[in-house]
């Protein structure tokens, strides 16, 4: 039986259909903001999923994110794959129709990616083929989603270039 990858899924989306191939081949440790969502997610992931509960909040600071990263690393023994797939919505097509909450959520998600990678990298380096996968939302396209897509694309490309020499692969999905 092949070894199961140690996968960290922060901000687990309620619909796993778009990322199932990224998380089904390993032991999954996930976080979410909605405690009612946990039992259903655990059934859809696999029997070895571990939940950190609602420890990840909208506050994307190092102090808010670091405990869940450390808890994941301690629970799994390592982080071999970080799958970043926050649930985001982008309502409105014209600039004047954009919703401020959507824009704030997207900018917070960019900040969250930065903070998660900053915290998780020490637990990933030296592992067997560690990777960070940034899942781009497949939502309505507008200025908000374009801004997020451009930001995470630039972050992924730059991080991949920098971290390749340490064996960490960063890619978009």
Image (spheres, grey):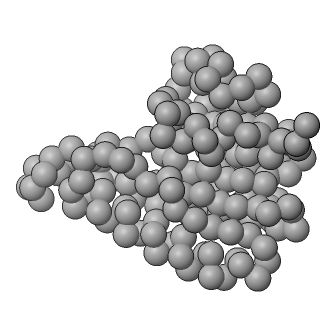
- Location of the N terminus by quadrant is top right
Residue, x 58% and y 37% (percent of image)? 20
Q: Which residue is at the far front? A: 1
Nearest the viewer among 109 and 156 is: 156
Question: Would residue 13 appear left or right of 9 to someone viewing this image?
Answer: left
Residue, x 78% and y 54% (percent of image)? 80
Nearest the viewer among 81 and 20 is: 20
Give x and y (percent) for residue 69: 73, 49
Question: Would residue 69 appear left or right of 88 to someone viewing this image?
Answer: right
In the image, residue 19 above or below residue 107: above
Q: Count the numbered circles shown.
A: 0
Question: Would residue 74 appear left or right of 145 to someone viewing this image?
Answer: right
Residue, x 70% and y 77% (percent of image)? 163
Residue, x 57% and y 51% (percent of image)? 84
Residue 37 position by quadrant: top right
Give x and y (percent) for residue 76: 85, 42
Give x and y (percent) for residue 156: 54, 70
In the image, residue 105 above or below residue 62: above
Residue 84 showing in the rendered view: yes
In the image, residue 44 above or below residue 90: above
Residue 146 position by quadrant: bottom left
Residue 100 showing in the rendered view: no
Give x and y (percent) for residue 119: 71, 60
């Amino acid at each position: 039986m092949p070894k199961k990858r140690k996968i960290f899924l922060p901000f687990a989306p309620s619909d796993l259909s778009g990322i199932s191939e990224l998380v089904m081949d390993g032991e999954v440790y996930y976080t979410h903001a909605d405690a009612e969502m946990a039992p259903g997610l655990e059934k859809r992931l696999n029997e070895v999923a571990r939940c950190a509960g609602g420890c990840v909040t909208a506050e994307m600071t190092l102090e808010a994110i670091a405990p869940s990263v450390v808890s994941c690393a301690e629970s799994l023994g390592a982080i071999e794959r970080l799958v970043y797939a926050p649930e985001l919505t982008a309502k409105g097509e014209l600039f004047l129709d954009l919703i401020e909450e959507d824009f704030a959520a997207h900018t917070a998600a960019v900040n969250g990616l930065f903070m998660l990678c900053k915290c998780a990298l020490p637990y990933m380096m030296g592992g067997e083929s560690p990777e960070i996968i940034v899942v781009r939302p497949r939502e309505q396209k507008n200025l908000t989603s374009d801004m997020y897509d451009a930001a995470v694309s630039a972050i992924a490309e730059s991080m991949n270039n920098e971290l390749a020499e340490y064996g960490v692969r960063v890619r978009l999905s």
